[in-house]
Image (cartoon, rainbow, N blue to C red):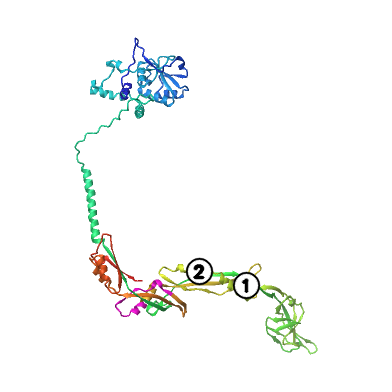
Amino acid sequence: MSSKLDKMDNKSTPVRVKSSGSDKPKLDKLDDNSAPDKLQGRDTIYIDTEDDITSIIEKVKKSENPVVALVPPSRAGTLQSVVNLKLLQRAAKTARKKLTLITNDRALIGLAAGLKIPVAKSVNAQAEIPVSDADEIPGNDIIDGNDLSIGELAALGDEPIRNKENKAAAAAVKSIETDDRIRNDHDADGVPDDDPAPPEPQPRKPVKGKKVPNFDKFRKKLFIFGGLGVVLIAFLTWAIFFAPRGTITVQAQTNNSDISTTVTLSSANTDVKNGVISPVIKQKKNNESIEFTATGVKEIGEKATGKVVIYNTNALDPINISAGTTLASGNLYFVLNENVVVPKVTGTISDPKPGVSKPVSVTAANIGSEYNIDADKQLNISGFTNRVYAVADKDFTGGSKETAKVVQQSDIDLATEKLKNQLNETKSKEELTNQMSDDTSVITDSFTVDYGQFTSAPAVDHPPTQGKQPTLTVEVTYTLIGVSNDDLNALLNAQLNDKIGGSSGQKIYSNGFKTVKFKNFQAAGSGFSVVVSTTGKLGPKLDEEKIKEMAVGKRSGEIRETLTKINGVSDVEVKFSPFWVGSVSKTDRLTVNFAVDE
């Protein structure tokens, strides 16, 4: 293996160690100043037969001395390879160490001479670089490729396979030799060689011969170019016969025509000729409320109640007394709550026995505790003086009176104004406007706010509930009205058609829809009324179909020249598409638009 790697090396000159009288190799001195004391600072490493190149490199790297002397065993296979020696030499350079070998093995000395690695005969001897002299090598030691047969050369080529050389080592040698070649350092001594680096071997160009036609590629190209041809034909057909389009815009001279008409907005069916349109109504209802303070003052309390027994003292017939009759005790008045029949007087004239009624309920006429009279208190009955009288059956109870704050009408009036002012009418109007569809025109002045019944809790002349403020509530209805754009356009067209009358020479170019205004909105009967005003534009009546027939096959300049000669036409714009089209051959590919001359 080592012999073949030597042949692969750029400096693969056969190496032989010089002999002088004996078989010991002759060594060139490494340094003129070499002396035994130079052996100091050298680390000696003994290599075992089991060590591979990786372990040897690790030992060199771990050495603490700048000079490392390797002592291999006799015929150490690891160092008999130029590949391993080069890897070892490169590792020593990287670790900044000087490598020497201590051996008498002629083969190893020959390899070291080729790589200029110093060799010493013994541990105590001075290392020197062996002499490499190709001239002193016997002829039978030199292999000439010209003298070898093809079979022998092939055998040499198969030698790495037979020896099962590590492919990684071959790759490493190639990398090292490539690096040496780039640096022009073929002897791997770290110093560029004097001779220029040999040129890189160029790969041999294959001999050109006649190629066999590739019918698959030919067929593929045929399909591709055939498809492109079909597409091109289809495109040309479309571009010539189907794509051409034209738009003719005629700008006409027009006259203004003012419109101002009162429209009835009614739920009845739309009748634009009679000025009736069905409105679009949007509503929103909210319950609004506000708290307020009661400022009224009033005496409040309860009326006393009780029962009386009525006596008939001199009537020989029963006496009927109706409910509502007043009874008085001094300046305290009571009202009889029910009808009562007082029995007649019985007994003799000398010993009369008055008639006595059953107990009847009465209520004090006013509030106050003073109406809580005691039992047996006598009361006069209005209208029956000296005939009958009443007596309290038991003590009257329930009468009371106190001064308190109560709700008065002025409090409600003030709260009503505050409630109206706090309403966000603008927001409600925007919400209703957003509810209108895009095909509806909104009548802004139609926005109204309607209030329902204002309710106060508590009511007028009543005190608030303890711990609570009086509250005023009302239902508010927001309303916004609009009209359909279709109905509005129909109304405007009807108004302008009435102005044109039977004239066949006039045409509506603009009915004024974009500038329409609504005024004087108000309620009218069961609906509403509003004044619609705008300005329309009337101009010459042009026949669209005749314009298309005239434009077929003509270029834009010809079309413009012909149409501008018509009375009432101020300008004409003609556009063809796509860009390569210069005329159109059919009327159905032409579009005619009419514009207003502002």
Distance Cα–Cα, label 2 vs label 1: 30 Å
* Nearest to N terminus: mark 2 or mark 1: 2
**Horizontal relation, residue 547 to residue 366: left or right:** left
The location of residue 461, given as percent across then percent down, is 65, 75
Percent x, y of residue 392 = 75, 79
Q: What amino acid is found at the position of numbered circle 1 in the picture?
A: Pro
Task: Identify the magenta region.
Answer: 494-517
Using the rendered view, name the quadrant where residue 256 is placed. bottom left
Please give the name of the residue rendered at 30% of the width and 18% of the height, measured from the top-left corner: 134
Q: Is residue 533 left or right of residue 140?
A: right
Q: Nearer the viewer, residue 342 or 257?
A: 257
User: Residue at the right extreme?
Assistant: 350
- Tell me, for residue 458, which label it has, or none: 1
**Residue 505 counted in the magenta span:** yes
- Left or right for 340, reference 447: right
Location of residue 116 by image quarter: top left
Is residue 173 covered in magenta? no
- Residue 129's x, y, as percent? 38, 18
| Quarter of the rendering occupied by the C terminus | bottom left
Q: Element under label 2?
A: helix
Q: Nearer the viewer, residue 454 or 399?
A: 454
As drawn, the residue found furthest toward the top would be: 21
